[in-house]
Amino acid sequence: MTLTTSEIEQFHRDGYLFPLDVLETDEVADIRSQVEAEEAKHGGKLLPGQRSKGHLLFKWLDNLIRDPRVLDPVEQLIGPNILCWNTLFWIKEADHKSFVGWHQDTKYWGLSSDKVVTAWVALSPASIEAGCMKVLPGSHTGDVLEHDENYNEDNMLTRGQELSREPTEEESVYMPLKPGQMSIHNYRIAHASGPNNAPDRRIGVSMHFMPPETEQIVGSWDSAALVRGEDPYGHFEPTPVPAHDFDDAAVAFHERASQAFREVLYHGAQNNTGKL
Ligand SMILES: O=C(O)CCC(=O)C(=O)O
């Protein structure tokens, strides 16, 4: 897949791009059934610790962070050397009030680069009704905005953070996706999502890609997977490639890597809500 010059310009100007077709229908169905089989082992929900760095646990997700259908457009946006810092599951139950407050990830991830991007793949319908993501175009180029940390239980973010001034409906752009489609946004952009008012679950997985010059400036140790090109800097410890689901070495690494991720995300927080 090749992005056009105007798509690349639009991404740099507005901070987001969608929809990109990534997975075939049968691939999405297979991945969804693997996710739901794992959830079934834990009473219908992934364990909180499985939400992040899941590419170290699930082979299909390790494959996805290396898939050319994902990386080709990412390379056109951030360059040929690509690290995958993290992956995150975003699952909203059918007809459920969980939402994601307006926020900018740059405030919480401890990463030094302005070029970090999130690629978000829909594993079930992510319509407006189902609570797809919405963005404030252009907000990735401005200052980091003021956030309130409300610890609202229904807000899926660690501290229930929300921008002190919420963008209006008129200012926002919704990014609906069909199963198998992907959006990409710059992690500085203000974004949010509403509750799932649809009859199906809204299942998404996000992948966070960055150029290797990026540094972790909050945590003392961090890791990333080199998924394309070279890493001449070595700021992040390379993650192992799992040979299969729950590969022992990768599971042991996941324990440490997801703990380091949590420490960064909860750094300075009033309390640890256990959402990750
Ligand atoms: O899945 C959502 O609704 C929000 C995801 C999000 O905040 C992100 O990918 O940065």
Image (spheres, rainbow, N blue to C red):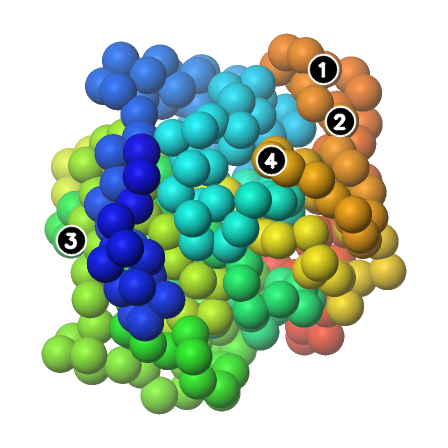
* Residue drawn where x is 33% and y is 76% of the image: 138
Instruction: Give left or right: position of 205 versus 19.
Output: right
**Distance from the alpha carbon under mark 2 to that under mark 1:** 10 Å
- Tell whether label 4 touches label 1 (CB within 8 Å): no
Q: Is mark 4 within 8 Å of ligand 1?
A: no
Q: Nearer the viewer, residue 272 or 260?
A: 260
Q: Residue at label 4? A: 228
Report crowding for label 2: few under 14, some 14 to 19, many 20 or more residues within 10 A (C-alpha).
some
- Tell whether label 1 touches label 2 (CB within 8 Å): yes
- Tell whether label 2 touches label 3 (CB within 8 Å): no
**Distance from the alpha carbon under mark 3 to that under mark 2:** 37 Å
Disc on res. 128: 3
Q: Residue 178: x and y, percent?
A: 19, 36
* Residue drawn where x is 30% and y is 64% of the image: 9
Report crowding for label 4: few under 14, some 14 to 19, many 20 or more residues within 10 A (C-alpha).
many
What secondary structure is marked by label 1? loop
Q: Amino acid at mark 4?
A: Arg
Q: Residue at label 2? A: 240
